Image (cartoon, grey):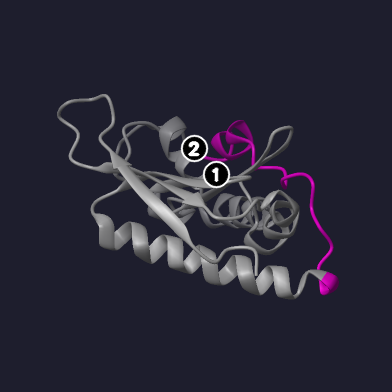
Amino acid sequence: MPIIRYRKEFCRPPNSRSEHLRCVAYLDTDISDLLPYLNRTLNGHQYFTDPPALTLKLPGKLVTLHANDISINIVHDEFEADTILEWLKEKANDTWNRRHEIQPKFAVASKPRVLNVLRLLPKTNCGKCGYSTCMVFAVMICEHAALPHDCLFLDDTHLKEIDEYIGRF
């Protein structure tokens, strides 16, 4: 198995008012060969070949896997870090064991374009969706952090078009 043990370190971000932590888990093995397989199975957000790195978007977090470590940008405590790291360890080891069945992926999927979503929104900037502008709302839709039907002024035709467009990603 590629990940057996790791050692964690925590630090506070440079912002002195920040209440969260950053976590780095130093791995006991090099997982470079695993990263393209994880990119396929976990649908990576960014993938780099030199040096090898895979970034995943989890709710409210970015997790970056390098050859010998895993970085998590925001954790509230050690328990949350352990939960994420154990989940990743399980996924990584399962992926490694099934690698002969998986086509490695050396790129990331294309992302929806904000302007394609924005052009379908009413552009009232009313804020009733919970975001300050339609542009911000479009960004959140593209990041899968908001749903198109949160816009009270979106007609059924445009709602369907946005759903179909976002569904391709």
Most frequent secondary structure within the magenta stretch: loop
Find the residue positioned furthest to the left. 17
What is the three-letter code of the residue carrying label 1?
A: Cys
* 112 left or right, relative to 84: right
What is the three-letter code of the residue carrying label 2?
A: Val
**Residue beneath label 2, please?**
139
Helix, strand or loop at label 2? It is: helix
Residue 117 position within the rendered picture, expressed as x and y whole percent measured from the top left: 58, 40
Tell me which corner region of the image, top left, top right, bottom left or bottom right, holds residue 137.
Answer: top left
Question: Is 118 contained in the magenta span?
Answer: yes
The circle on residue 165 is none
* 100 left or right, relative to 113: right
Q: Nearer the viewer, residue 43 or 122?
A: 43
* 60 left or right, relative to 144: left
Question: Is 143 contained in the magenta span?
Answer: no
Please state the extent of the stretch shown in magenta in the rendering.
Answer: 100-121
Residue 70 position within the rendered picture, expressed as x and y whole percent measured from the top left: 50, 48
Q: Is residue 96 above or below residue 156?
A: below
Instruction: Name the residue located 67 percent from the left edge and 59 percent from the top edge.
Output: 38
**Residue beneath label 1, please?**
142
Residue 56 position within the rendered picture, expressed as x and y whole percent measured from the top left: 55, 50
Asked if disc 1 and disc 2 are in contact, CB closer than 8 Å, the reply is yes
* 57 left or right, relative to 79: right
Q: Is residue 80 above or below residue 119?
A: below
Residue 99 position within the rendered picture, expressed as x and y whole percent measured from the top left: 78, 69
Instruction: Name the residue located 60 percent from the left edge and 56 percent from the top edge.
Output: 163
Q: CA distance from mark 1 to mark 2?
A: 5 Å
Residue 59, visible in the rendered structure = no
Q: Nearer the viewer, residue 122 or 147?
A: 147
Residue 21, visible in the rendered structure = yes
Instruction: Name the residue located 54 percent from the left edge and 57 percent from the top edge.
Output: 156
Q: Is residue 141 above or below residue 81?
A: above
